[in-house]
Image: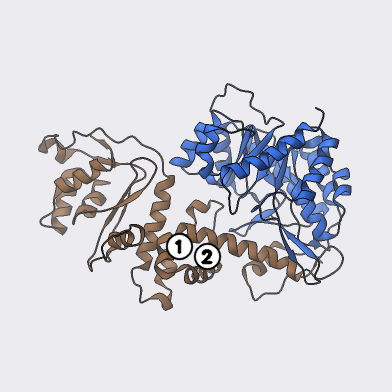
Chain colours: A blue, B brown
Amino acid sequence: MLDRTFPNDLPALPGVGYKPQHYTSIIADPAPVGWLEIHAENYMGQGGRPLAQLRHLAERFPISVHGVGLSIGGEGRLDADHLARLRHLCDWLNPASFSEHLAWSTHDGAFLNDLLPLPYTDATLARVCDHIDAVHEALGRRMLLENPSSYLAFDESTWSETDFLREIARRTGCGLLLDVNNVFVSAVNLGMDARAYIAEFPLDQVGEIHLGGHDEDHDDAGRPLLIDSHGREVADPVWALLDEVLTLSGPRPALIEWDNDVPDWPVLAAEAGRAADALARVPA
Amino acid sequence: MSVTQTEFRRSVLDPEAPAPGGLSDGRGGAADRRFAVYRNNVTVSLTDAMESAFPTVAKLIGPESFRSLARLALRAHPPRSPLMMEFGADFPAFLEGFEPLAHLGYLPDVARLDHAMRLSYHAADADPLPAAVQSMPPDQLATARLQLAPACRILRSRWPLHGIWRFNHEDGAPQPQARPEDVLIARPGYDPAPHLLPPGGAAFLTAAASAPLGNAYEAALTETPDFDLTALLSLLIGTGAITALE
């Protein structure tokens, strides 16, 4: 297990999703970034440059491990091999945080490499809770569960998303990761009120905030359809929504996600700077 | 009405299938265009993953052809694991059975090379053995066993595999010659590189994986009477491929 000379938790500072092309810039001058997030599945090889870079970064920064392949919302059992790989990574890295998604990606042995939606019913609630219990048991650490970006709704759903997440946190003891861009995207797409969603969200359980860019498209009826693309700057209404969240929650670790068309480091650092400004406006 | 993940999965992978029922736009309206977002995300992300896994195949047939081919391949063989670094292990076999590209007989081997390069990149680190191997007395060498670094891979081909790789990745590389070529992938630091193995080298290294070097030498001579062990050893040492000899 890696030892650290600094407190091993996520500070209420901006973080960024780590991209290897930024390695040299981050080592030279990370400001204003105070921590980094990695996608777990990219660091499950046996060695080579990815793990060597991660080891060096983990000696300097708190690291958040963010899984994108566990399929917690899947109908089937969790993939025991994948759970073992996550445990191996977390045991070695001793990350400040581990998080995953309220979504599924694997069904009947096929991994679809996307975060797919699930209905919110008593049955899916029980299944998701079982899966999170299994994660807690396998990793020996508390995970954060992230709210999804939604493009459609299920007729069979009987729970609101905020009640569903609150109940999961209550039953399993997991924390929550609040993706503010996802809230905005889902609200526009499903005709909800983003501010009402935030007001109903169990903010006391939030251990981390995500911010990312989205694209604009249109649906069959010509209404705006926002796509959670992580390929550009965070939109202004999402920054405004972040201010509302932080006013209610107090400062929280806030991550910029930029996974496609990744910009040069100064552009990403400027986005992190905007998150730093938002955090600075909030009384601790 | 409830939507099963079996239905969802089927429709997400099949562009001709309608969106499952029981879905809406959140206001009671149709969800077809919305379901298409997931279908597009799945297809594009997996196609991108194929393109980064098989850069040489993509270069040989062109990006547009490759993306069409990748869509067919991933619908036939969706990934079996969330580790995208391992994705595409069955692509060479898919290419072998893919009639429209049968005239490009070397493509499956090129796909094998691309995949092996990716696995080499993520393989375990290992310190190379300090040189001085060639000074080992011949009688000791015959009974010694050789261990290659975990990042090493050996590929045998009846096509000019190394020449094809170079021609597609190195400026000014010569045209591939019409001949069989075996390849050693080695990774001295963090960047794997393919090297042309001398004739008999692949037979030697394959045998040496489970037998003393004397037996491996016999195996190489059987296949290649003028097998040059010195040339092979200097390639192995020069690329940091040997981690143990004892």
N-terminal of the pair, mark 2 or mark 1, is 2
Mark 1: amino acid: Asp
The residue positioned 39% from the left and 67% from the top of the image is B60
Q: Position of residue B78 (x, y in %)?
A: 55, 63
Residue nearer the viewer, B79 or B61 = B61
Q: Position of residue B196 (x, y in %)?
A: 25, 55
* Residue A121 in the image: above or below residue B10: above
Question: Is residue A120 positioned above or below A248 on the image?
Answer: below
Q: Where's residue A18, x and y in %? A: 58, 42
Residue at 83% x, 58% y is A157
Can you tell which mark lies on residue B90?
A: 1
**Residue B23 at what x, y percent from top left?**
79, 66
Q: Amino acid at mark 2?
A: His
Quadrant for the C terminus of chain B in the image: top left
- Is residue A66 in sight in this rendering? no
Q: Closest to the observer: B75 or A135?
A: B75
Residue A19 lies, with reference to residue A58, above or below; the image says: below
Tell me whether circle 2 and circle 1 mark residues in contact (CB < 8 Å): yes
Q: In the rendered view of the protein, which quadrant contains the N terminus of chain B?
A: bottom right
Protein chain holding label 1: B
Q: Secondary structure at mark 2?
A: loop
Q: Dot 2 corresponds to which residue?
A: B77
